[in-house]
Image (tube, rainbow, N blue to C red):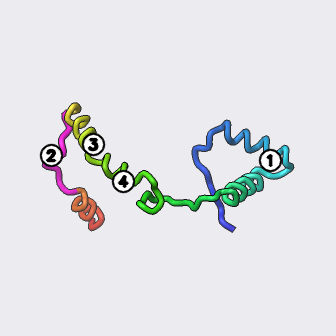
Amino acid sequence: MANLNIENLPDRLYLELQKLATKNQKSLGEQVVILLENSLENSSQSINFFLSPDNDPNWEIRCKNVPNILAEINQRLEKRNISHSHNLPDSTILLRGDRER
């Protein structure tokens, strides 16, 4: 059986899980497994981790907004006096050099 470690779990959520486990006379781990199983069983939608035209009804709207978002990013960078045209070396070359040491 696999193990699952959860980092940065809010204290409030942890306490609620403990209360629920005590109420149901289960261990904390058993209660979490039950909640996850119920959640996955009741989910009518498939889990999609990547946005694509197949699973995002707003795909076309998102694509149309990309130029506006990029323009906004560039405006913010200009306000901060940050430009993309610094003569910085390619990070790929730097990483390869580090790995070859």
**Residue 86 — which label?**
2
Earlier sequence position, callout 2 versus callout 3: 3
Residue 8's image quarter? top right
Earlier sequence position, callout 3 versus callout 4: 4
Quarter of the figure with the C terminus: bottom left
Quarter of the figure with the N terminus: bottom right
Residue 53's image quarter? bottom left
Q: Report the residue marked by disc 3.
A: 68
Which amino acid type is marked by label 3?
A: Asn
Mark 3 lies on a secondary structure that is: helix
Binning the other alpha carbons within 10 Å of mark 2 as few (below 14), some (14 to 19) or many (20 upward) gives few
Earlier sequence position, callout 2 versus callout 4: 4
Magenta segment: 81-90
Binning the other alpha carbons within 10 Å of mark 1 as few (below 14), some (14 to 19) or many (20 upward) gives some
Please name the residue shown 27% across and 40% down the image: 73
Which is in the foreground here, disc 3 or disc 1? Answer: 3
87 or 94: nearer the viewer: 87
Which amino acid type is marked by label 2?
A: His
Mark 2 lies on a secondary structure that is: loop
Relative to 45, is 100 above or below? below
Q: Report the residue marked by disc 4.
A: 60
Distance from disc 2 to disc 1, alpha carbons, whole Å, reads: 56 Å
Residue 59's image quarter? bottom left
Count how many numbered circles sit on residues in the image: 4
Q: Report the residue marked by disc 1.
A: 21
Which amino acid type is marked by label 1?
A: Ala
Binning the other alpha carbons within 10 Å of mark 3 as few (below 14), some (14 to 19) or many (20 upward) gives few
Relative to 93, is 87 above or below? above
Which amino acid type is marked by label 4?
A: Glu
Pointer 4 with pointer 1, Cβ within 8 A: no
